[in-house]
Image (cartoon, coloured by chain):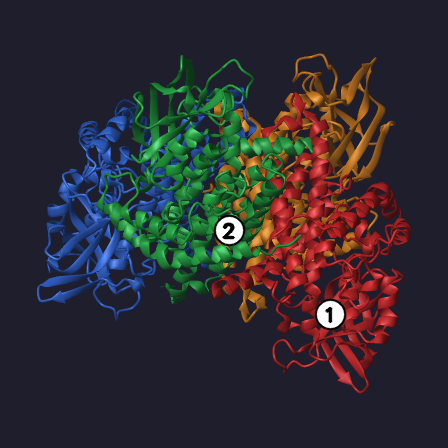
Chain colours: A blue, B green, C red, D orange
Amino acid sequence: MDFAHDDTTLEITARVRAFLDEHVYPAEAVHTRQVADTPDGWAFRPVVRELQAAARDQGLWNLFLPPTAPSGREGGGLTNLQYAPVAELTGRSPGLAPRAFNCAAPDTGNMEVIDHFGTPEQKERWLRPLLAGEIRSSFCMTEPDVASSDATQIATRIRRVGDAYEITGRKWFATGGMNPDARILVVMGKTDPDAPRHRQQSMILVPRDTPGVRVVRGLSVLGYDDRDHGGHAEIEFDGAVVPVSHLLAGEGEGFAVAQARLGPGRIHHCMRALGTAERAMDLVRDRVRERVAFGGPLAGQGVIREWLATSRIEIEALRLLVLKTAWLMDTVGNRVAMTEIQAIKIAVPRAVQQILDRAMQWFGGAGLSQDTPLAAMFAGARSLRLADGPDEVHLASLGRAELRR
Amino acid sequence: MDFAHDDTTLEITARVRAFLDEHVYPAEAVHTRQVADTPDGWAFRPVVRELQAAARDQGLWNLFLPPTAPSGREGGGLTNLQYAPVAELTGRSPGLAPRAFNCAAPDTGNMEVIDHFGTPEQKERWLRPLLAGEIRSSFCMTEPDVASSDATQIATRIRRVGDAYEITGRKWFATGGMNPDARILVVMGKTDPDAPRHRQQSMILVPRDTPGVRVVRGLSVLGYDDRDHGGHAEIEFDGAVVPVSHLLAGEGEGFAVAQARLGPGRIHHCMRALGTAERAMDLVRDRVRERVAFGGPLAGQGVIREWLATSRIEIEALRLLVLKTAWLMDTVGNRVAMTEIQAIKIAVPRAVQQILDRAMQWFGGAGLSQDTPLAAMFAGARSLRLADGPDEVHLASLGRAELRR
Amino acid sequence: MDFAHDDTTLEITARVRAFLDEHVYPAEAVHTRQVADTPDGWAFRPVVRELQAAARDQGLWNLFLPPTAPSGREGGGLTNLQYAPVAELTGRSPGLAPRAFNCAAPDTGNMEVIDHFGTPEQKERWLRPLLAGEIRSSFCMTEPDVASSDATQIATRIRRVGDAYEITGRKWFATGGMNPDARILVVMGKTDPDAPRHRQQSMILVPRDTPGVRVVRGLSVLGYDDRDHGGHAEIEFDGAVVPVSHLLAGEGEGFAVAQARLGPGRIHHCMRALGTAERAMDLVRDRVRERVAFGGPLAGQGVIREWLATSRIEIEALRLLVLKTAWLMDTVGNRVAMTEIQAIKIAVPRAVQQILDRAMQWFGGAGLSQDTPLAAMFAGARSLRLADGPDEVHLASLGRAELRR
Amino acid sequence: MDFAHDDTTLEITARVRAFLDEHVYPAEAVHTRQVADTPDGWAFRPVVRELQAAARDQGLWNLFLPPTAPSGREGGGLTNLQYAPVAELTGRSPGLAPRAFNCAAPDTGNMEVIDHFGTPEQKERWLRPLLAGEIRSSFCMTEPDVASSDATQIATRIRRVGDAYEITGRKWFATGGMNPDARILVVMGKTDPDAPRHRQQSMILVPRDTPGVRVVRGLSVLGYDDRDHGGHAEIEFDGAVVPVSHLLAGEGEGFAVAQARLGPGRIHHCMRALGTAERAMDLVRDRVRERVAFGGPLAGQGVIREWLATSRIEIEALRLLVLKTAWLMDTVGNRVAMTEIQAIKIAVPRAVQQILDRAMQWFGGAGLSQDTPLAAMFAGARSLRLADGPDEVHLASLGRAELRR
């Protein structure tokens, strides 16, 4: 047992940290201004494009791609354990850094599954431009009318009609889906409702401009429409037809593809969430050292010290749990690591939400407003408690596993 | 000791409840649409005006005005204890009901203080149209650069210059201040920085169109800009000049005026917050009875029953505490009730935030989005923990009182 | 709605408070010494007898008996709402005051049910000496082998054999049952396992010295054997035979009798628990004002102020909920008040346990030891979460009621 | 970074686990009986002696002694990181296993400091028989009259008088001190009240039978007097005189010696606490699978699954934090690991207390009684929150460190 990061990790995190200092933090105010100036747009703003160019120049690009990925050579070749601290750092500027490095959800997960399960044609047409940052993508899983954490309830139908599939259904919370650059939609639906429980679903690639695809509206998350990175779309598929070659993996493989996406995605989400918590700690530290009330700096108050201490403990303990999960994924695989993957999915967003809630408090009204990144980070942590199924589903599953021990 | 509401309360709440059923709930979707259709506006939308007309017709107007108010005859003549359940009911549709009844903050507090402390001229010019719902108002207390829960830190200056006062400073979180109909601003500033601690401040009435008044921008609260009711403004006063007759009460009376505003305001805020919690309970009840997952309705899950039970207990206990506080204000006055006023200010928003947080969870993504009122209610409860000073200030004050017992 | 206590309540609580100051608090150290000197005894120690004599002299005796009780004339004739604050005061010295006033569980509940359901003979033989404090009693409900909060699972059999009933089964946590003065046991068992769910059980009076009754051992509660007031007994009934005249109410009435016992008992338990919390607040206040650490009195620390404040809020809100429950019982009866009775049963012990947990913390090691009453109070609050069925059962029941609203 | 235990750890934990199964768990009921049969004794009961003989035979003895310890050859030669999982396993039977392996506090800490700081004579006289399990020891640090987590407040005086030291003062919570076999007391006192803050104190070895040493009484912890392993003593030193050769390290070294004791002690305490939590999980699992209520096994209830899940997550995260702390102590030393040492001291007992609190709940009354080990484990976890200073002191210190980052 060894708790020291290896040299590769130390080297890459040092470079990422330097990039944040030099490029990303200074760009935050610029980005806010560009978003305010283009209230009707849903695509990346110019400063994000500039950051991407700079990051790509420095080789800080697609770092999320693991060495076992067929296309790993185009990414960082980092293991999950090595990439995790990189993800945490990008969480410190969650609106910019993941995009600057082409490491933002849902593109990462989409790239991974096309890389693993895609045909050469699919890779050439969609993976290549995604890896190059030329286009974006969206993932269409959740449905408004059913509890879609229960995959058997998925109502979207994918019907074979001759040489094509016809897709009919309604999806929502398709993150990034309002972005006109999201040229490709990865859609989960049922090809065979009579198959066994986890063989009913398939995953299919649907170009955004396919007739029958209608982007209905953007959904807000605690008041945020997240238009700076494509929002969260409701999308209607009304008999959209794509060639059979657009199927990802085989018929009935949809559930397996979705599961494969989950493990790395949760590591990324959780580490980024811990990064937001660390950024919040930094902001609070600066605030309470400077802010004076009732005769002294806030930093002199016992309740602030106690909060800093308990937040620190939670961050440290949970980070170790995420890192161990990453290590398990690297060494024994996602399936064996399922318990830990569920555990971090439940625990990290809850803890980070609480840390951010209290952090906002030390800032007064500014903490809730656009003048600090805290409120948007809070909304992000809150939404993680529902992403890929609500906590409650995972708690029940983990509890059942515990009973079987 | 008697826990039954009196007949006046039973009668008025029955009428308010009927009005909600008949007019307000059906208007919610209309209002959402009108707001979506006018993304650039900050004033009340037409449906609010229609609700106001209907409410006024039925005598459900200005119910917040207590019988001891000089202008009580124009209101409901209800005691704080009688009005409290009315406020709770309006909280069930927090974006519409308080405005429909002309019982929304900050107008209520502003009307109260002009009624109590204003000159006949001030009342004729500002109170009359406010009571009539012809204009709105804003309250300019909090400042961006200081911890303004510590009144001695207020930096805005009100300087006597001949027959006029000149106001210079910067305020923010002036709720409703983006609304062009907010014709009058109630501004707190310092007239004498050398006076004793709580005699330095004065309160002054500043018409919105006074030269030197600049509405800078709207601030968001957890992503909500609240443009449907005038938002939360940052306002700069750059040598704005008003006649001396615009002073509210005397020089040095600002702190006392602010305190007088607090008691009733907290009752209203807390009861409305409990109303949002009750609405959330109703929504969750309907949801979990209908929604099916993993083979059965959500209502069959133990964790949901446990949540409903603990939420019910908290609501019941805290409602009693608020009602007792209202009773104390009616019988022994705001000053004696200060401990209870602080207690409810701390406890109710915290509890309601937690209830709403969990309520959103049962709705999945919809809970966070514009498709339920839960997320906006959550943002409201969260912001109450900072309104009139953060919880921490009140906890420290209450703790000191406890040590003195 | 009126939150003021009536004159009867004010008068009786003033007298009880004076009695505590004059007699009870000074007796605490004496009692501790007498218990330490008689490690093998389970009966009341002499100082308790002396307090009883003094209380009886002052008419502070059997105050728990309501005016509607047939024998109310021998008690205080107080309503539940009037008695509740008396119960709270006795909780301030939980090891002495309830016994001093002959108002201690389980005798109170046993007296109530004999009073309501007993025959003249039963009253003469058992109620009279109980009211006089000449004997004690125990209540035999819980069983070691089944989840006895589910009354249908009760395994103890009460079989009619000619003119007698034969009782066979095993009970435990029969509070007071180790006290040799507990001359009468109130035993719940099944007379007809084939009857409808809540008509299977009967309640019967079993004299302690009945052949076949064996007091097996005392059970500890978080390390406390509570031998000063008769402990918590495991009792075996091995074919114990009593005349049919010992049945309390009729066959099949056992569940109804048990339910009748619950309402007032929970008011008493909850108010006493709040009394322990208030005593703890007093002790902490004194402690932190005097105790110096790291350069100043503990009272100067923000975390202590915050704890005092949050504890105060919880006590105030929950007390109102208990008082409202008492008022409901007085005005509409136990059945209608069932939701509130469950609510306080869940909420008060949880909150008081937390308050006491933190109170112990401010005392360091002393807080956990016999040198303060805090640890024993903590054990008492903790055990309330299991008495009459664990919280979880009541939460589920309350949650179901909430779903039916 | 590598989360796998090394072979040494896997081998030793397998042996310890086998020993628990074969010897320790079966001895638990025997021990309970022997304690009940000898209510007046404070020394180890015979079954503990038998377990010690068996453990020593198998080389499972003094495993806590690190390889860097001068006497490491007599122990297991395990690093802190290797020993930590052993300590966790001993926590599964906290009343027996630590003693069976001669790895129980406070002997472990006392052996460590004599080993590091003692003279050859001190080692021969006290360390040798302690390592052999022939005698026990106690640590006299905490004082009843001062906040002794603030070392400057220690009031016990150690005065040089010719060739001797005279000790005067009062200590309490000297764990194990009631055991007549605790032949040696390690006592902290002030040799020079005028020296710098952390140079005022010295540590001295005082034989139990020294004239002037009076063991006053045993203190209880949540009702437990812990007489099976020597209780928690109050000890008066009334001019007790020992030769100067009994000083441990030099004058003024007392604080440094105490600090050296802390690091390993906290690892042990925290890992044992996690072991109690794991045992509780096992007990609950068995209970809820078997226990039937309201028509089904408890295991079918959602709230139990949710509890098992959240408990599992907390245990996993905190264990990693403790293991990392152990690794830091091994690699960079106690001083650098101070933040982590404080963090685990705060977080682990809190979490374990909550886990045990809920575990008791699933057992009903049995959970609080002597019929399960849960209540005693709970008292142990609760007392850890005060041992070596209350949480609050450590939170404040950690918070200050966080502000300095």
Position of residue B18 measured from the top left corner of the image (x, y, whole percent):
42, 59
Three-letter amino acid code of the residue under disc 1: Arg
Furthest-left residue in this view: A163
**Along the horizontal axis of the image, is D112 left or right of D224?**
left
Q: What kind of element bears circle 1?
A: strand
Where's residue A194, x and y in %? 26, 71
Give the class, few, some or many, for how many residues have Cα within 10 Å of label 1's Cα (few <14, many ≥20): many
Q: Position of residue A245 (x, y in %)?
A: 11, 57
Q: How many marks?
A: 2
Please, which chain is the residue tagged with disc 2 on? B
Q: Which residue is mark 2?
A: B85
Q: Which residue is mark 1?
A: C170
Of the pair C313 and D229, the residue shown nearer to us: C313
Residue pictured at 88% horizontal, 53% vertical:
C52
Label 1 – label 2 distance at C-alpha = 51 Å
Please give the chain letter of the residue carrying mark 1.
Answer: C
Q: Based on the displayed image, in which of its 4 quarters is residue C369 positioned?
A: top right
Q: Amino acid at mark 2?
A: Pro
* Res. A278 in view: no
- In-front residue for pair A17/C199: C199
